[in-house]
Amino acid sequence: MTDTVQIVLARRPAGDVTADCFREETVDLGAPAEGQILIRSRYLSLDPYMRPRMTELRSYTPPFELDKPLTGGSVGEVVESRNPKFAKGDVVMGMLNWATHTLHDGRGLRRIDPSVAPLSAHLGVLGMPSFTAWYGMKHICKPNAGETVFVSAATGAVGQVAGQLAKLAGARTVGCAGGEEKCAWAVREAGYDACFDHKAERDAGAVLDTLCPQGIDADFENVGGRIFHAVFERMNNFGRIAFCGAISEYQDQTPMAGPTKMFTIVQRRLTIQGFIVSDHVALMGDFVNEVGALVKSGQLKARETVVDGLGKAPSAFMGLLRGENFGKLVVKVA
Ligand code: NDP
């Protein structure tokens, strides 16, 4: 008998996610069957992509199921194993339930060395968001020394790494973030040349004209909407746009239309590429080597927000969609 506390999707949101979209329940998971392992969650990653998964709209991942636990990238410890590939005590990373315990068949799980870095780092600066930043910056934005690179959600899990990688490549980096504290950190700690507060500055175009007088050569797009429109209009010839996400649209039931002057793409010979990091797992080793070394040497800094207790996951997730997290948001489950 294994009692687990889990959080299930109780209702699909229409517009903003609300507390009644979630329900906490305690269930008996039973014992692992042949081939299964029982994992105790230690850290759960909360990520923007979970918001589209709460709906039934077509996307690159299937929707969460109603009355079933939500899932997320997690680090956990094997407490019982009937799978020859895993032993009791192994620390593993992969998709687990929003739960204290998960029964798993082991597919897609990766064993990690807990001595390398704090466990939460495997979900942030050494994990999926950082890999996303690395892929988009290195393979799509391809910044050259002296170019101007723009990053929206500049201090988020992805943006903070993207901005620093562009800076390390010798580019001038400009970002936007919500609030003075985040913008100050972006410049002081993450090395952005400038960062503006998108909540205070309503005219993003005017700010960009001041902060990017030479135009924008590469855009790492996390937010979409009005900020993206302003950036798009200021792209230079042969500019690259790595379209990573559009968080401003995830809760918006009437998202704004895209830029109207699409001929700009032709006139300025722009490359606009959407990408999903999971398509590029073959490059994970290169990422770990490059970014792991930067983290170890102190050249790459990363903020995280740790929320204590599984029960706080729903409110923390709602806060993420309002910009209340600073850097990578994780829940310490145990
Ligand atoms: P973050 O940790 O940065 O959290 C989201 C941040 O977005 C918030 O903290 C907030 O920061 C900002 N934000 C929220 N709503 C708005 C809004 N309406 N307008 C402007 N900013 C807003 O998330 P991640 O770094 O993990 O993700 C960033 C983006 O990358 C998301 O769009 C996500 O979906 C995408 N993504 C894509 C992947 C891929 O494979 N393509 C993989 C991982 C992430 P602030 O206070 O600065 O406003």
Image (spheres, rainbow, N blue to C red):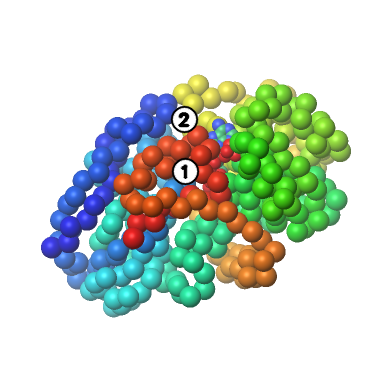
Q: Is residue 172 visible?
A: yes
Q: Position of residue 165 (x, y in %)?
A: 70, 56
- What kind of residue is marked 1? Tyr
- Where residue 202 sits, quadrant-wise, is top right
The secondary element bearing badge 1 is classed as loop
Question: In the image, is the residue at mark 2 within 8 Å of ligand 1 by its beta carbon?
Answer: yes
Name the residue beneath numbered marker 2. 251
Q: Position of residue 268 (x, y in %)?
A: 80, 35
Left or right of 163 on screen, residue 322: left
Quarter in which the N terminus is drawn: bottom left
Quarter in which the C terminus is drawn: bottom left
- Where residue 55 sits, quadrant-wise, is top left
Residue at position x 81%, y 56% in the image: 170
Look at the numbered discs 2 and 1 and tell me whether their residues touch, using CB distance below 8 Å: no
The secondary element bearing badge 2 is classed as loop
Mark linked to residue 261:
none
Mark linked to residue 49:
1
Q: Earlier in the sequence, mark 2 or mark 1?
A: 1
Question: In the image, is the residue at mark 1 within 8 Å of ligand 1 by its beta carbon?
Answer: yes
Q: Position of residue 153 (x, y in %)?
A: 61, 41
Residue at position x 79%, y 39% in the image: 216
Residue 259 sits above or below residue 247 on the image: above
Residue 203 sits above or below residue 117 on the image: above
Of residue 201 and residue 128, the one placed in the foreground of this image is 201
Residue 91 sits above or below residue 319 on the image: below
Residue at position x 34%, y 42% in the image: 64
CA separation in Å, label 2 and label 1: 11 Å
Q: Is residue 263 visible?
A: no
